[in-house]
Image (spheres, grey):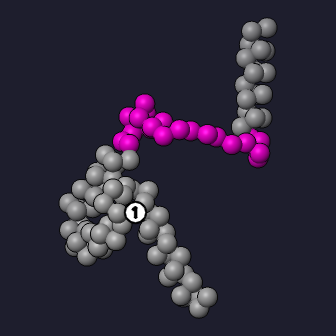
């Protein structure tokens, strides 16, 4: 009987996860318990990794890009800024 209950519970959970009308709300810092870096350490790690792996890319592209943003920007701001440039480039390419 216990196995049947577990199987039914699993089936119900699986059906809920398949639902197309679900939302997941996760707060800031959820990655901390998973031992993933938070925004500032992640930002510093990405900058350091790019700089050490491709100095020219870092100097020619990343530094000027970051200098366009406020001094307290982090990785999400930087990625959004890159996304804005990508959208502008796409619209220019399509002459929109």
Vertically, is 44 above or below 17?
Answer: below
> How many marks on residues?
1
The quadrant of the image that shows the N terminus is: top right
Q: Position of residue 42 (x, y in %)?
A: 34, 48
Q: In which quarter of the image is residue 82?
A: bottom left
Q: In which quarter of the image is residue 35?
A: top left
* Residue at the extreme bottom: 95
What span is colored magenta in the figure?
18-38
Q: Residue at x 33, y 48 (%)?
A: 40
Residue beneath the point at 77% across and 14% down: 5
The percent coordinates of residue 38 (x first, y second) are: 38, 42
Q: Does the magenta stretch include residue 32?
A: yes
Q: x%, y% of residue 15?
A: 77, 35
Left or right position of 70 against 96: left
Residue drawn where x is 78% and y is 15% of the image: 4
Please name the residue that numbered disc 1 is placed on.
Answer: 78
39 or 53, nearer to the observer: 39
Q: Is residue 91 above or below residue 51?
A: below
Classify 61 as above or below 70: below
**Residue placed most toward the observer, 17 or 69:** 69
Task: Determine crowd level at label 1: few under 14, some 14-19, many 20+ residues with C-alpha closer than 10 A.
Answer: some
- Quarter of the image with the C terminus is bottom right
């Amino acid at each position: 009987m216990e196995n049947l209950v577990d199987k039914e519970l699993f089936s119900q959970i699986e059906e809920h996860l398949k639902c197309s009308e679900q939302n997941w709300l996760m707060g800031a810092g959820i990655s901390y318990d998973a031992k993933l870096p938070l925004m500032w350490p992640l930002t510093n790690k990405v900058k350091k990794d790019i700089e050490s792996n491709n100095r020219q890319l870092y100097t020619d592209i990343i530094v000027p890009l970051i200098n366009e943003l406020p001094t307290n920007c982090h990785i999400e701001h930087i990625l959004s800024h890159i996304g804005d440039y990508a959208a502008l480039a796409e619209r220019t390419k399509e002459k929109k």
